[in-house]
């Protein structure tokens, strides 16, 4: 069994993968709020709790791979994984770790580990050109070529960041949850805010996807949405072709398979 760890700015996901990708499955996926103060012992305590709840055996974990966009959290996550499996885990972004793709941007070192492993997973599952739409702390659109290379993308404020800013920057607007409203025209403050966030981001998605296709000179893209809000927004637009909440974890599994000790 393989442990895949995806540490983002807001949350850290852990996936326990059984079998060989892409034909295996996640036996357990859980998440923690990202906190750079957590120690390897903290991660192990939560891991042991989740393994016990799932009826799994920690001793069955024989490999691990870590991807993080939070440098301050890397050391504790790597120490946790190393103690678990008895050797250094695969760390996405390390000079010796191959991804199996070319990074075709001006400064390849600036590409986030999460965006690259999502590109790896998307290419393994869908043919042709892809756009990976990730609803994370930021809302990102990443272009993956038909050859599986990372061609760049778009970074916009995340949905929850927009909600926080709307509440914090005004005197009377309340904090709300993301929901799909039945109507565009809100007849109350909360309804108007829900519409602005939901249908505003649908407009962002449709507009950015259309502009990417026009700039690329082809409409032949598969758009894959991932992240916690993927299913909610996929229901509001026809431009999203597929959703996979665990796309980034799948990419981490594939990178591990490419780099695992022989």
Image (cartoon, grey):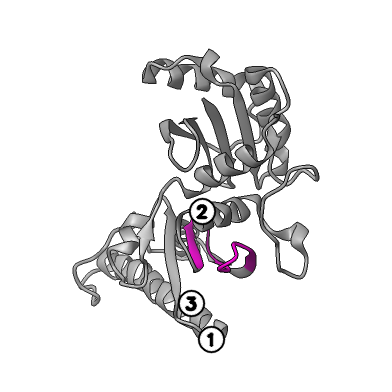
137 within the magenta span: yes
244 within the magenta span: no
Query: Foreground mark, 1 or 2?
Result: 2
The location of residue 6, given as percent across then percent down, is 57, 41
User: Badge 3 is on which residue?
Assistant: 208
User: Badge 1 is on which residue?
Assistant: 217
In depth, the one of 23 and 233 nearer the eye is 23
- Confirm or deny contact between disc 1 and disc 2 (CB under 8 A): no
Q: Quadrant of the C terminus?
A: top right
The location of residue 214, given as percent across then percent down, is 51, 86
User: Could you tell me how far apart the alpha carbons at marks 2 and 3 are, in whole angstroms?
Assistant: 24 Å
Q: Is residue 193 left or right of residue 102?
A: left
- The dominant secondary structure in magenta is strand
> From which residue to which does the magenta span run?
129-151
- Dot 2: what SS? helix
Earlier-in-chain disc, 1 versus 2? 2
Q: Is residue 34 left or right of residue 94?
A: left
Query: Foreground mark, 2 or 3?
Result: 2
219 relative to 170, above or below: below
Residue for point 69% across, 35% down: 90
10 Å crowding of disc 1: few (<14), some (14-19), many (20+): few
10 Å crowding of disc 2: few (<14), some (14-19), many (20+): some
Residue 182 in sight from this viewpoint = yes
User: Badge 2 is on which residue?
Assistant: 124
Which picture quadrant has residue 24? top left
Q: Is residue 252 left or right of residue 55?
A: right
In depth, the one of 178 and 97 nearer the eye is 97
């Amino acid at each position: 069994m393989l442990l895949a760890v995806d540490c983002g700015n807001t949350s850290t996901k852990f996936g326990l993968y059984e079998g060989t990708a892409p034909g295996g499955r996640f036996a357990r996926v859980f998440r923690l709020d990202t906190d750079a103060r957590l120690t390897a012992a903290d991660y192990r305590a939560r891991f042991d709790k989740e393994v016990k709840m799932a009826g799994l055996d920690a001793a069955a974990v024989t490999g691990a791979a870590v991807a993080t966009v939070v440098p301050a959290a890397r050391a504790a996550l790597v120490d946790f994984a190393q103690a678990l499996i008895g050797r250094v885990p695969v760390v996405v972004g390390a000079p010796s770790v191959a991804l199996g793709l070319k990074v075709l941007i001006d400064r390849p070192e600036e590409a986030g580990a999460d965006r690259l492993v999502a590109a790896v997973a998307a290419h393994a599952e869908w043919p042709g050109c892809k756009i990976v739409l990730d609803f994370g702390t930021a809302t990102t659109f990443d272009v993956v070529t038909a050859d599986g290379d990372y061609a760049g993308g778009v970074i916009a404020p995340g949905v929850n960041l927009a909600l926080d800013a709307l509440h914090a920057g005004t005197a009377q607007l309340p904090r709300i949850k993301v929901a799909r409203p039945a109507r565009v025209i809100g007849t109350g403050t909360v309804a108007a805010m829900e519409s602005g966030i939901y249908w505003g981001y649908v407009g962002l998605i449709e507009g950015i996807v259309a502009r990417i296709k026009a700039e690329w000179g082809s409409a032949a893209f598969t758009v894959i949405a991932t992240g916690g809000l993927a299913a909610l927004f996929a229901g509001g637009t026809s431009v999203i072709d597929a959703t996979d909440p665990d796309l980034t974890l799948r990419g981490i599994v594939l990178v591990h398979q490419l780099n695992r000790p022989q």
